[in-house]
Every structure is written in structure tokens, then in C-alpha cells.
Amino acid sequence: MKSKAPLLFIITAIASLITAISFGIIATLQYVQFDFLKPFLTFNKVRPMHVTGALSWVLLSAIGGIYYYLQKDGLLKKQLLVSYHFIIFLLTGIGIYTCYALGIFGGKEYLEFPPILIIPILIGWFLFAYNVIGSLLNGFTKRPVYFWMWCTGSVFMIYHLSEAYIWLTPYFKDKFLANTALQWKAGGSFVGSWNMLVYGTATYVMAKLSPTSGVGTDKKSFFFYFLGLSNLMFGWAHHVYLIPIAPWIRYFAYLVSMTEWILLISIIYSWKKSLNFNTTIENKVVIKFLSSTDKWVLINLFVALLISIPAINYYTHGTHVTVAHSMGTTIGINTTILLASIAYIVQKENPNFNFKLVLKGLTFFNIALILFLITLLVAGASRSQWMYALEPSAFAAMQYKLKTVYLIMAILGSLLTTTILVMVLPLFKGLMKALRG
Amino acid sequence: MSKKFLILIVLICFFGVYNYLVYTQSQPPTKPLLSTNALQGQKLWQDNNCNSCHQFYGLGGYLGPDITNVYSLKGGDFINAMLNSGISTMPLFHFSDLEKQNIITFLKEVDSTGFYPDKKSIIHKNGWVEISEK
């Protein structure tokens, strides 16, 4: 009997997405009205709640999708481990949010929970890697690229999550600059690792929709896989260009980061050309999501390449331009890929599912997101101007001047939230129906 | 062994060497290490998630200012006053005198590692930025 745990991962992922956007709205409102909810939820609680929700959305939906596809293809060997994995992550997630609500921290940025909680997270990732790699090991070298991406992504996820706690070791404890650099090395490569899982998912769905395209099996797919893997390993240091660490690390990062992003756009571009008409009609909603991904890759490619040039990074670093880049990739690219994957799964589980509302939501989602990102870029440019071009003035004065921009950001954020809800709530219902069926 | 697997092995070997070099060389030998008191201050910094609003070297949350060089720009008394009173955006944390002193020591030692924003950086024509040394 097939396990329902993959669907539970995806359902929890959608709940995490709703949590993330709710706390995101509260965080933005705290920029507008500084003491908004201050007695109950200070910004140091709201921000990690928002970020953890967003990370959980990406990771849980990718994990759930991978388990689902391996199960559907008859490859998944240990069905019971999927349930254990889900229970571990669910309990840990509840633990993390409880800590945040009570103001119990202790970790570093993005992993602010008490460090002890990384242990169950690592156990969960070990179970995932063991199950995925164990299921695909037989004849591995001849398998399509998405299986390579899932296997390497899971292994590097364990490595970089462990690396994020290197500051606890006696050798690194008192080295502030090394710890800052390594925190961002681990964080940057952690994102590279989840991209392996997410882009692997995109490639899997594309290969299934267009089996004759060669996506996932041709030389080009593997070339870009290795390029992506190199970026995961060596392309993290554009985050630390302005920190006085060893200069060679920053030089090397500059070289490597210039190759980033080309991989996915090329794969999607060649795949779109190969789609046959019938497949496009049958899977309209999945194709629409992946076409949106295509556009967001283009936009983010442009921003990412610009801010990877140290001379431009100098002005954009430490401003909302960086937030625009990370939100553009997380919401624009990762979320559209993951929604394509979820829509594909919902369609498999409920062949008569009506996607009309989801498609409408997608159109407005793209408009709301572009406007939201433009507002972030404006906020970033204003902050940069305050830092480098204007006469020195108080930080509070600069924040006060930006209040209108933050207000627009909050309004657009609410609009974006609405469009996301319009897309995910029907999908959520479809998954619940599949779970009960 | 397949060609693809060989490439993977070679990349992993490079990654191993690269990591060894990054782990051992990222902190330049000329840069100071954190004292015991500063480490206590750093712990308080993390236990209260100060990074959600403040930044060091532009890394962190944006609700509050970057405080890489707050010690040299404003001084210990200013930091102490902020910790004593809190402001509309920053909660009052009720630190003891010793805890406040440890936080100030931590900020002082972070300050001694470099500049941010580094307005004396040199921007080269190839796009490289040479940061100033402290």
C-alpha cells in the first residue's frame, strides 16, 4: 500500500507558506508602524517566524514532491521511513515556533532557534538522503539528471546544515570574521542545495510532460547540472565581498558567480521548444507555472548578475535590493516551480480538477510580485543613497522618510498574499481530497 | 567508471581542498580574536536575536541600523544608554550591568575588525572593490 506521507509533506508545506506570508505582512506593518503588536510579537520574533515558514514551504514541498514521484515511479524502497521523516520534521517545526513565540533563540541568522534543534533536523535529512539515494543507487550512473540533482542536493543539504554550526567548535568560536564568512558560506550553499532539489523537480516534471525532449538525459542537462553543482560548492562568497576576510576567497567567488543562473533558463528554453501541442493543452496549468518561472529566471538572472559584480554589490549590499533578489528567487522562481509540481500532483490524483481559479490567481500573482519587487528596489536604492551619497543623518530620519515606500510595500504585500491564497487554497483542497481518497 | 561519475568525484575532491583552505584562511592572521567577555556578549546577541533588526557588515535585518562601527562612532556610553532605555522599535531587554558591559565589549571588538559602510574603498575598473584595512 502506498504511503500518504508525501501528500502530508506537501499539505504542511502549503500551511507553512500561509504562515510565512502572514508573518511577512506583520513584519512589513512593523516597518510602517514601529510599535505594531510590539507587546506581543516583537520584530525579533516575527522575522524568524516569517523566514522559517518560507524555508519550510520550499523544503517540505520539494521533499514531498520527490517522495511522491519516486513512489509513483515504483522506485521508493522504504515507505515507512517517509512517515518517520514527516513526524520528525513536524514535531521539530512545532518546537521551533514554540521557541520563537517564547523568545527563546540562540542560533544565527535564518537558524535562530536553539542549536540543539538542528539534531532532529539533521536526522530527518539523513532519513531523506538514505531513502532517496538507496532507492536510486542501482544503475545510478545511467539515471536521468533529476535523480542526480536530488541525491547530491540531499547530501549537500546535510553537509551545509552541519557547516552552519561550525561556530560552536573551539577552533572557530572566537574568530568573528571567519564565523561570519562561514555562516554565509553555509547559508549560500544551503540555498544551492535546495535549488538542486527544486530544479530537479522542475526538470522531472518537464521530462514527464515532454518525454521525447531529451530534458534530463541529454549531455546539455548534465553540463548544466555540473555547472550548478560548482556554483553550489564555490559560488557563495558574493555575500561577503565587503567583509575583510582573505581576498582570494572573494576573487574566486567573483569568477564563479558570473556563471550562475544560466543553467535553468537554458534547460527551460530548450524544453519549451520541444513541447508538442497535445501535451501543452492537457497540462495547461503546469505549463503556465513553468512559463512564469522562465520569466522570473530572466528577471532574477539580471539582478543576480548585477549584484554579483563587486562594484555594484558595494552599493546594493545591506539594502532591500538584496531582499528583492532573495524574494524574487524564492517567490518568483522556487514557488512557481513548486506550484507547478503540486498542480501536476493534484492533476494526477484528481484528473477532473478545475484549475480555473488557480490560473486566474497566477496572472495577478505575477503582476503583484513585480510591483512588490520594484518597491523593494526603490527602498534599497534610497537606503544606499543615504549610506553613500547624502550628508550623514540619523538612521531613524532615513527610516521615517521611507515610510510611504514601506506603506506601499505593505499594501502590495497584502495583494501578493491574496493572489497566493487564490492559487494555493484550491490546490490545498485538491490535496486534502487525495489524502482522504 | 562512467565519465559523469568521474567528474563528480573530481569536483568533490576540489571542494574538499577548497573547504580546507576556506576554514583555515578566512580569518586573516592580523585580525583580532574575540575575548571571553566579548564571547559572552555575542551569546547575549544571539540569545535575543539582535541580528533580526541589526546588521554587521551589512548582513542581518534592516529594521535597525548596521552597528559594525557603532562603538567607534558613538561610544560605549551611548550603547549603554540605548540598552537601558530601549526605543520605539527596540524592546527593553532588562540586561544586568555585567551583561551590558559584555555586549559593549563584543561591539567594541567587532568594531576593531574593519569598516562598514567602508567609504574609503577603492573601486577598480574590472569591477573589483578593494576594501580598506583597519
Image: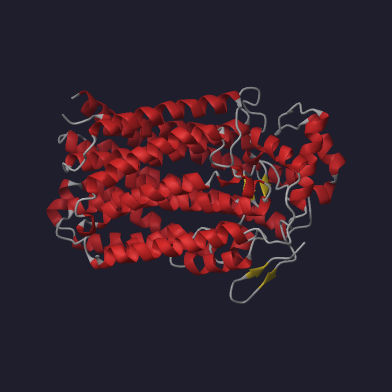
User: Quadrant where the N terminus of chain A lies?
Assistant: top left
Q: Nearer the viewer, residue A335 or A79?
A: A79
x and y, in percent, of residue A399 in the image: 69, 44
x and y, in percent, of residue A317 in the image: 61, 56
Q: Say whether residue A54 is visible.
A: yes
Q: Nearer the viewer, residue B27 or B122?
A: B27
x and y, in percent, of residue B24 in the image: 60, 59
For this view, does B113 lie left or right of residue A48?
right
Residue A122 vertical placement versus B27 (above, below): above
Residue at image location 53% in from the left, 63% down from the top: A308
How many discs mark residues in the rendered view?
A: 0
Residue A389 vertical placement versus A285 (above, below): below
Q: Which coloring applies here?
A: secondary structure
Residue at image location 45% in from the left, 40% down from the top: A55
Q: Say whether residue A333 is visible.
A: no
Residue at image location 59% in from the left, 23% down from the top: A102
Going by the picture, which residue comes out furthest to the right?
A: B77
Residue at image location 21% in from the left, 40% down from the top: A76
x and y, in percent, of residue B86 in the image: 76, 31
Q: Nearer the viewer, residue A197 or A119?
A: A119
